[in-house]
Image (tube, grey):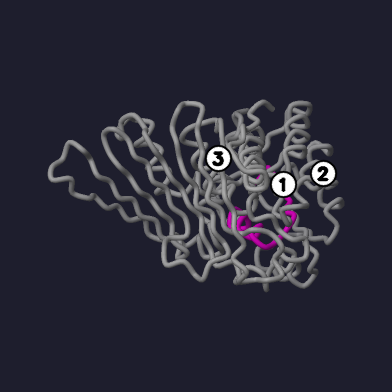
Amino acid sequence: MKEIGIGIIGMGMGSNLLPINQVADSRLEVRGLCSRTPEKLARLATRWDVAYHTTDYRQLIARDDIQVIAVFSPDHQHIEHARAALQAGKHVICTKPMVTSVEDAVELVKLVDKTGLKFLVGQTMRFDPEFVAAKRMADDGDLGEMIFAEAHYVHDARGFFPGTPWRLQAPQDLMYGGASHPIDLLRWFFGDVEEVHAYGRKGNLTPEYPYEDNYLINLKFANGVIARVLAAYGLVEPPMPMMGLGLYGTKASLQADFTDRQEGHLRLVLDKIAPKPVATFNFPAEKEGALGHGGGVMRYLRHFEECLLNDQTPSPSVREGAKSVAVCAAAWQSIREGGVVKVQNEF
């Protein structure tokens, strides 16, 4: 029975939620859409049989038949939309980045604590099969004690701007909008980041973009693991997988990646097997991925559904989202001021 109504704000990546209406054993149903483009709204509402659509997010949030608001608006608007939803008594799914400042993250943590509502940060890398498999291996001790890790998310961002002009008009902060992906992935494995050191450089492939858009970020975790993040968006189409993870332990080394064709791979070398052959596991593209990260979105929707039904805390939660935002803020501070920066982890 479809008894939990969802309203979506932002119909770019937010379109990835629409297939839930065709999942018979899910209680979730998209019942309302919101976007600034009426023609797009009408087209999607017809395609997915959604009865209500509006260009005013306040009208969407006010509806009694909607219990969950999914925030997929431009990054800088997340705080406004998530705040309004929580204040109206709605649970929230918010795509990454949760927000673009530590101050806004603190506000959302306090609101979730006050209201007791559920809040999920939509980080798809935590739900992609190759990274889930890597997490299981790490948790089960198959890799041994972790020594070093790395993660990346790379793009030629020139392809983003024509379809999402707000990224230049706002403009989007790619430290939060991009680097938050690999940062959150590593935080999922290793917990709190204690210290950050970072460099940034502007690629100038899009001269009107005002900030640095390529980052090298070194992380020291509270548990002693050290890691590096490559987050680069001002490069000529990088000939490498779009997203990647490397884990290096005392028993094994592992690399996993996710390509722009929605295909995943995992490569494993076990120290106890001579002469150290590489075992390769392939994860085919999913049909839900046609809209971009669709399979991961479906899985985090089902996770959120379970949390609603069983009164569990979603993961990544609002606090986890806040901690990833704090790492991004520390990286910017290191780029601007130089040196190693301590990361705020108390929320």
Task: Name the residue tied to disc 3.
Answer: 303
In the rendered view, tell whether residue 291 sits above or below residue 346: below
In the rendered view, tell whether residue 310 sits above or below residue 182: above
Q: Which residues are magenta?
A: 2-20
Determine whether the residue tagged by mark 1 lies in a helix, strand or loop: loop
Task: Name the residue tied to disc 1.
Answer: 100
Label 3 Cα neighbours within 10 Å, binned few <14 / some 14-19 / many ≥20: some
Q: Is residue 197 left or right of residue 284?
A: right
Task: Please tell me in which quadrant of the rendered image residue 206 appears.
Answer: bottom right
Residue appearing at x 61%, y 59% in the figure: 213
Task: Name the residue tied to disc 2.
Answer: 64
Q: Locate residue 331, reporting x and y percent.
A: 61, 44
For marks 3 and 2, the one nearer the N-term is 2
Q: Is residue 33 magenta?
A: no
Residue appearing at x 55%, y 49% in the figure: 181
Residue type of the residue flagged with mark 2: Asp
Residue type of the residue flagged with mark 1: Thr
Looking at the figure, which quarter contains the C terminus? top right
For marks 1 and 2, the one nearer the N-term is 2
